[in-house]
Amino acid sequence: MKKVKFLKKVAAALLGIMLVSTSVPVYAADTAENTAANETQTGNVISETPEVPEETPEETPEVPEETPEETPEVPEETPEVPEESPETPETPEETPEVPEETETHVEYQVHVQTYGWQDWVQDGVTSGTTEQSKRLEAIRIKLNDTGISGDVEYRTHVQTYGWQNWVKNGAISGTMQESKRLEAIEIRLTGDLEQQYDIYYRAHVQNFGWLDWAKNGQTAGSEQYSYRMEALEICLVEKNQEAPGETTEPCKYPPLLYRTHVQGIGWQPVVKDGDTSGTLGQSRRLEAFSLSLNHQKYEGSVEYRSHVQGIGWQSWVQNGATSGTVGENKRLEAIEIRLTGAMAEYYDIYYRAHVQQFGWLGWAKNGEPAGTQEYSYRMEALEIRLVEKGGAAPGTGGEACKYPPTLYRAHVQKYGWLGWSADGSASGTFGESKRMEALEIRLNRQKYAGDIEYRSHVQGIGWQSWVKNGATSGTTGENKRLEAIEIRLTGEMAKYYDIYYRAHVQQFGWLGWAKNGESAGTSQYGYRMEAFEIRLLPKGSQAPGSTSNAFRKGKAGWYYENGYKFYYVNNVKQTDIRNVIGAQSSYVIKINKAQSCVTVYANDGSNGYIIPVVAFACSPGSGTPTGTFSTSDKYRWHTLYGAKGQWCTRITGHILFHSLPYTDFNNRTMMPNQYNKLGTWASSGCIRLRAGDAKWIYDYCKSGTKVIIYNESSPGPLGKPVYAKIPANQNWDPTDPTI
């Protein structure tokens, strides 16, 4: 009986040992599905574990008292232990295994985009994903219970939120269901754990991959890059023992931070090395920018300056100061950036500008200008990169700063000389009806030898002589319009470039592009040039636009059209050429009765009377005959039906050419209401004319002049003049040469 009791005590001791050995696996089997409450309960189990060995020694002393002689028999009796074996030699053999099961481990699990919580892993195993572009969103970390006092504490840097508060021992750090990335992490031990162990950890980060190992609260991951952590490894190392790998750079920080002040927006958020600051496609000017080094490894500073509208190059500033202007509505046109001190020895600083009309230009570096000068173009965005000394440039070459190859200006009616315009910009005015009177053109920063020559077609002068390289072409102070221009290159410049130019002309607007000495503008129109534009392009380049109608030459002189011979001045058909051709020996007069219009024709030799000389509005009447007649008698004054008339020429019978009717033989007794009827039927049959027109027929159309009276819908080849009305009480003819 005593032996049975003893065996029961041995069995109880063995059961206690079994409970101790199984407590750790129960803790390790914790999964992502455990809630915070489950974790708390698990912690309670762990905290009780140390009590098990305390009970075991209390039972153990009884073993040698009752079974010293039976010990060798234990192997034979073991299968029967539950029933009767009094031997207990196994108890001391199991006890040494307890320390092996309580070795300190770090366990962790991460919450991954799309996948959620992953399984727990421990001691340096990767948790998360690589090459899947998935962010870590949260993490939990804990240690198994070894009886060593202290905690594991940790915090994460979360997208938008920044650094969260410290948590410990399996609590969640980060976010869930907010789609926010972890960007960095810090982990530390406390209590005796901190004295016995170093905790190492490293992060796998978007665009960087695995970074170096951090330890004991250092930062691992990246900051200010907006890059996601994708995986993590954590391990414990006995104090001051060798790290699991390289520890040089566990956290990445952008070496540069900068921001820009944008038209209509103000200061934009700070961006990092290599990012774009400003706007694209919005036609907004940069007005200022600031720049600073970040977590720099060497002494030195970054200095920079801006080329500002209306100001030019400003003074150098450094380390976060503002360059440019704020509140003055002035555009940045170019920038320069340079490093000083040891930073200049170990790094090159590259930068480029996005500019109106050009877009992204090439990369400048170490104090070179980036942007444009003399174009008056706005910078719209910029990018800056810090590169290890001698490293490859961030992009391909190309001009980092654009300078206009030509500069030119116009002298404009009332305004005088305008400011210099750059290649591709217009000089002059639009919609103001102001004439260009002169111009000046010069090459700028030319790469080859040669000149730019030009000349102007000037009102009343014609083509002037060629001038070059900034000399004035045209006139000033003479109120003469420019009508056309010609421009050409000489020397090596002509070998490597084509020069295109176009004119903005009264009535026509922009004409097509001329090049290399061709005429641009108009002649024989009497039209003013109002503006012009020039483009210098590499030889053989495509024209900047249409080349049609670059120069329009108006009609001048005689032209046969539609069976008639017309005379043009400045492309305008002349409707009165009496002073052009002078008095002729003979004329033919045609009267369109239906349209109340008289047209006089001169002879064109064998072609007959096909030259329209002048047209008069008249007043025939229902009694006016049609047919072909010859003039006969002429009268200075003549009595008409109930009135008097001047400058009378008989057509046929009682039908005369004469002035408007008067009440007396006095040229101040004209019937005023009759003057205003010219161009309509108003007579009994004669052909009424203004006094000046009647006198011209009286003076220049000899007796025997052929007169043809007909009816057609078209007044005649010169049309029908329209005369201004006179006041109702005016009793004299304004064309009467004797008044």
Image: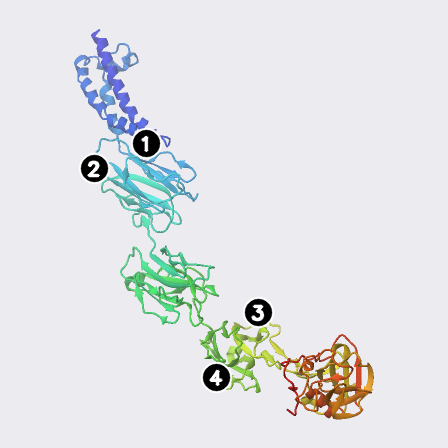
Distance (Cα) linking label 1 and label 4: 87 Å
Q: Position of residue 523 (x, y in %)?
A: 61, 81
Q: Earlier in the sequence, mark 3 or mark 4?
A: 4
Q: Earlier in the sequence, mark 3 or mark 1?
A: 1
Tags 1 and 2 touching, CB below 8 Å: no
Q: Nearer the viewer, mark 1 or mark 2?
A: 1
Distance (Cα) linking label 1 and label 2: 24 Å
Which quarter of the image is occupied by the N terminus? top left
Report the amino acid beneath label 4: Ala
Q: Which of marks 4 and 2 is in front?
A: 4
Distance (Cα) linking label 3 and label 1: 72 Å
Q: Which of marks 1 and 2 is nearer the N terminus?
A: 1
Direction top: furthest residue: 1
Q: Which of marks 3 and 2 is in front?
A: 3
Residue depicted at x 47% and y 82%: 470
Which element type, helix, strand or loop, lies under badge 4? loop
Which residue is tagged 4? 471
Which residue is tagged 1? 36
Q: Where is residue 66 in the image (x, y as percent from the top left)?
A: 18, 12
- Which is more toward the observer, 172 or 650? 650
- Which is more toward the observer, 696 or 738? 738
Which element type, helix, strand or loop, lies under badge 3? loop
Q: Which mark is residue 458?
A: none
Identify whether 489 is placed above or below 666. above
Q: Which mark is residue 191?
A: 2
Q: Earlier in the sequence, mark 3 or mark 2?
A: 2
**Is any atom of residue 108 visible in this view?**
yes
Q: Quadrant of residue 64?
A: top left
Distance (Cα) linking label 4 and label 2: 87 Å
Quick one: label 3, few (<14), some, or many (20+) residues within 10 Å? few
Q: Which mark is residue 545?
A: 3
- Which is more toward the observer, 697 or 665? 665
